Image (cartoon, rainbow, N blue to C red):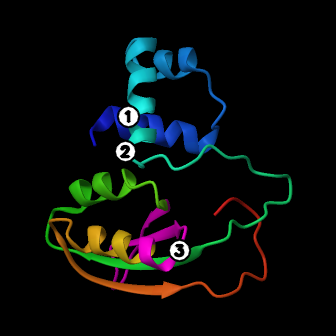
């Protein structure tokens, strides 16, 4: 996954209905390239679905969690770039204190979630992770 793939995923997360022409203008590549990339991301499973958010967001079914991440040395920018490229990472926060990052994850089931955690732990520069699965959400004001 390269910078263009990450840019497309990021834009489509904000608005899955963005026209190819708009994505082309934002990324500076041709419409044909954007369309081919989106087709490839769908075909390889990186983009699993195009969806909507309702006015009162309804949490998707599946597994949601927060993952606290410790990064070795000066590798934070590289690690953050790779984490942003994972479609299961719904939000990524840099923090102070023990953890360098907190990632909000969402996946369709425990098997897929386990694979996502495996992929995260294999990212060069990540030294320690701690994961907490979210069991119940009492208040949700924005999209997770």
Comes first in the chain, label 3 or label 2 = 2
The residue positioned 37% from the left and 45% from the top of the image is 44
The residue positioned 15% from the left and 65% from the top of the image is 124
Q: Is residue 58 magenta?
A: no
Comes first in the chain, label 1 or label 3 = 1
Indicate whether 143 appears above or below 70.
Answer: above
Magenta stretch?
A: 90-112
Q: Callout 2: 10 Å neighbours few (<14), some, many (20+)?
A: few
Circle 3 residue: 109
Circle 2 residue: 44
Indicate whether 134 appears above or below 113.
Answer: below
Image location of residue 134, percent across then percent down:
60, 84
Q: Is residue 109 magenta?
A: yes
Q: How many marks?
A: 3
Residue 40 shows which numbered tag?
Answer: 1
Residue extending farthest right: 55
Distance CA(mark 2)–CA(mark 1): 6 Å
């Amino acid at each position: 996954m390269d910078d263009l793939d990450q840019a497309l995923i990021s834009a489509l997360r904000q608005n899955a209905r963005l026209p190819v022409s708009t994505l082309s203008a934002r990324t500076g590549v041709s419409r044909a390239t954007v369309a081919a990339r989106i087709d490839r991301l769908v075909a390889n499973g990186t983009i699993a679905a195009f969806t909507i958010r309702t006015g009162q967001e309804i949490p998707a079914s599946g597994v949601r969690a927060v993952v606290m991440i410790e990064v070795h040395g000066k590798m934070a920018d590289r690690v953050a770039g790779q984490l942003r490229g994972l479609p299961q990472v719904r939000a990524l926060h840099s923090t102070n204190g023990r953890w360098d990052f907190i990632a909000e994850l969402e996946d369709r089931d425990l098997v897929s979630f386990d694979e996502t955690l495996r992929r995260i732990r294999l990212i060069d520069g990540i030294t320690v992770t701690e994961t907490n699965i979210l069991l119940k959400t009492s208040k949700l004001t924005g999209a997770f």
